[in-house]
Amino acid sequence: MHIVDSLKSLVSGLGTAKDKSATMGHVLRVVGPEELNAMHRSDWLARKVVDIVPNDMTREWRDWQAKGDQIEAIEAVEKAPLINVAAKVNQALQTARLFGGSAIYIGIRGDNPAEPLDLARIRKDDLHYLHVLSCYDITAGEIETDVGSEFYGEPRDYQVAGANGLTLTVHPSRVVRFIGAQILDRRQAAANTWGDSILQVVYDAVTNASSAQQHIAALLPEAKLDVITIPGLGEATKTDAGRNALISRFTFANTAKSLLNAVLIDGNGKAGDGQQGEKWEQKQISFAQMPELMQQFLKVAAGAADITLMRLLQDAPSGQGNNGQAALQSYYDNIAARQRTELSPAMHRLDEVIIRSALGSRPPEVYYEWAPLWGLSEKEKA
């Protein structure tokens, strides 16, 4: 049995053909890489939406749990100039959020990149370098559809074009894959092989906030406007002599205003023509509601990007009873959750390579924990 639950009103038109909302629907407009790049390079809000989350995910990095000499060896590999794991992961996350996908290529000494990565063969100092590639630098092959494969849902291989014109085939086990905004529809995901840009979802919210700011800024020169009514203005501007006389007249009036802080105008029309003299008035624009309006646009953009407004603007809320600290702590809890559920699984293979390259083996007791993002105050510690 099918049950249809809907509201209709023949009087108001709700739910009928007269209902304007009945014609509404969602349409996907894919934002191209050129516009995404322009947004990131020219709009401060779009850049923050892309960069803040990766910066926070990698800011405190992680704490290795092992013996002292083992920790020193692992951290030495992580901070090596050609490896620099934290910086490379940060760059890869930013690139993925901007363009929809990125990859870190794991460079192993003496290995064939087309062959599967055999962790058992990794020896001390075998990790040579890490390279960050955007989804436009590396071409994903066909998606693995075998549910028995550990790479199910990922490309079976990757192609990277070299500077010499040769194409390098890379096995997926040698790639740390990052996705911007996940596409849950597997039909679309199979065609795209990567994800959506995070700016794809927040495009309208960011554009509206930036547009509101620009419109408010454009009103500033018009905040105080002098309006002068001149009898016979139309006739006076028909000739060159009349226009020049008008320009000279108000150039002098403006100079007199600067000197005397007063506007000098003609109090009478021409003798005997019965016209009134010039009339001066001043119009002002009220900006009383503008800050609140701008704040609302920024709140929508922050909510769309899943970043608390306090973190987005680096501005502590004012007033009694504000919940800025609670919102910020909730945001950092969300970042910590994403470190555990997104970043750790993506980096698992790379971490195994780092441990083996640093220690020459894989001690089972070695692991790491993400460093806390939210520090306790002295009062909370007490």
Image (cartoon, rainbow, N blue to C red):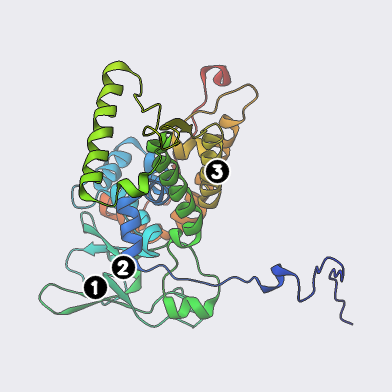
Look at the image and tell me whether residue 252 can be seen.
yes
Sequence-first tag of 3 and 2: 2
Viewed as shown, does residue 238 lie left or right of 377? left
Tell me the quarter of the image containing the C terminus. Answer: top right
Viewed as shown, does residue 274 lie left or right of 110? right
Farthest residue, direction left = 164
Look at the image and tell me whether residue 65 can be seen.
no
Measured from the top left, where is residue 23 in percent x and y? 67, 73
Residue at the disc numbered 2: 174
Sequence-first tag of 2 and 1: 1
Q: Residue 299 shows which numbered tag?
A: 3
Amino acid type, label 2: Arg
Q: Residue at horizontal 71%, vertical 72%? A: 22
Separation of disc 1 and disc 3 at Cα? 46 Å
Q: Are marks 2 and 1 in contact (CB under 8 Å)?
A: yes
Q: Residue 113 shows which numbered tag?
A: 1
Separation of disc 3 and disc 2 at Cα? 41 Å
Q: Is residue 59 above or below residue 108?
A: above
Q: Secondary structure at mark 1?
A: loop
Q: Residue at horizontal 36%, vertical 63%? A: 99
**Nearest the eye: 201 or 296:** 296
Amino acid type, label 1: Pro
